Amino acid sequence: MAPRIDVPEMMRPPGNGERAAAVLVLFGEGPEGPDLLLLQRADTMRKHAGQPAFPGGGIDPDDGGPVGAALREAAEETGLDPSGVMVLASMPEMYVAHSGYRVTPVVAWWREPSAVAAGDPDEVASVARVPLVELTDPANRLQVRTPSGYVGPAFRVGGMLVWGFTAGILHRVLQTGGWERPWDEDRIEELPPEVIDLAARE
């Protein structure tokens, strides 16, 4: 599934020395059915402050690649046990222009879920397992317009507005997996001022 996902031209790495990173797109079977692990970054962070995101970060030399980095970062940020995670596939690299990272999303199944909670409070404000039924609910789908005029997919779930790079990946995963339900793509809202203020720190 994951390797066939088409990467939009604007998200294709330019290939001129950006740092490599990885995120963990982790699905599991939760109390309310299949769900996805997301976290909300702390408002005090210098980059991506307050943004909902997949666990993840830069690839270190000892990680052995994107999979090792995604699992290590997820363990540090949420406390999950990597031994209970079954990696399914790695998606193509995608470029995040704001931070200059080439990010590889690693799709996985949580075969043996473990307790999770926010790790370092300076980096992670909260951790949530968001039911897939909420992510695919048309009432929770919309598009947001950034100050630059760019319009992209977004989700209102778990008290969070998921937008930007994370929402873009999630949108494509739901499409490719055949889980997407028809939703009103003409529902476009301006990105809230408080979100813009936090994003402007980058």
Image (cartoon, rainbow, N blue to C red):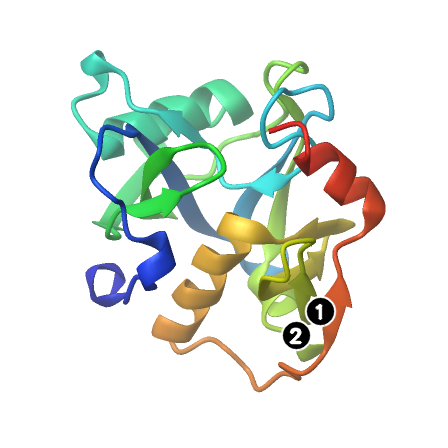
Locate residue 5: give its quadrant: bottom left
Return the residue at label 2.
Answer: 137
- Whether residue 120 sits left or right of residue 158 in the image: it is left
> How far from the left and from the top, in percent, is residue 12?
29, 52
Could one spot residue 179 in this view of the protein? yes
Pointer 2 and pointer 1: residues touching (CB < 8 Å)?
yes
Frontmost residue, 184 versus 139: 184
What is the crowding at mark 2: few (fewer than 14 residues within 10 Å), some, or many (at least 20)?
A: some
Which secondary structure, mark 1? helix
Using the image, determine if residue 44 lies above or below residue 53: above
What is the crowding at mark 1: few (fewer than 14 residues within 10 Å), some, or many (at least 20)?
A: some
- Whether residue 181 sits left or right of residue 74 in the image: it is right
> How far from the left and from the top, in percent, is residue 102?
31, 38
Question: Mark 2: which amino acid?
Answer: Asp
Frontmost residue, 146 versus 50: 146
Could one spot residue 81 in this view of the protein? no
Locate residue 195: give its quadrant: top right
**Residue occupying image coordinates x 63% and y 55%:** 148
